Image (cartoon, rainbow, N blue to C red):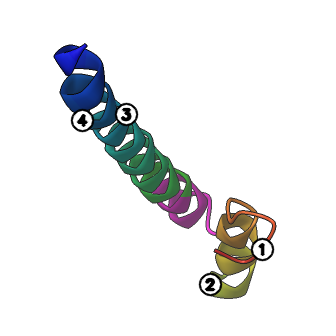
Amino acid sequence: ALSNIVFVPVANKIRLRAMEETLVLQLILEGVIDIMAGKTPHLIGMHLRGFQPAGGG
C-alpha cells in the first residue's frame, strides 16, 4: 500500500545514515584511543584504514 511506497524507503535511508554515523563515531573513538596510547600517526592511519570497505570506499 501507500506506506510501503513512501515509508519503507524513508526508513531504509534513515537506517543507512544511522549506520554511517555510527561508523564515523567508531573511527573517532578508535583514533582518540590510539592517540592516548601514544601510537604514531602512521600506525593510527593504518589502524583506521582497516575500517574502510574492501573497495577502498
Q: Secondary structure at mark 2?
A: helix
Q: Label 2, on which residue?
A: 41
**Mark 1 burial class by Cα count in 10 Å: few <14, some 14-19, many 20+:** few
Quadrant of the rendered image containing residue 53:
bottom right
Identify the mark at residue 55; answer none if there is no mark: 1
Residue 32: where, in percent of width, then height? 46, 58
Residue 16: where, in percent of width, then height? 41, 42
Give the residue at x 61% y 58%: 37
Give the residue at x 77% y 73%: 55
Tag 4: amino acid:
Val
Which of disc 1 and disc 2 is earlier in sequence?
A: 2
Give the residue at x 65% y 67%: 48
Identify the mark at residue 12; answer none if there is no mark: 3
Task: Establish if 7 lies above or below 29.
Answer: above
Q: Secondary structure at mark 1?
A: loop
Which of disc 2 and disc 4 is earlier in sequence?
A: 4
Answer whether labels 3 and 4 touch (C-beta < 8 Å). Answer: yes
Q: Secondary structure at mark 3?
A: helix
Q: Secondary structure at mark 4?
A: helix
For the residues marked 2 and 3, what is the alpha-carbon distance in whole angstroms?
36 Å
Q: Label 4, on which residue?
A: 10
| Span highlighted in magenta in the image | 31-39
Give the foreground label among 1 and 3.
3
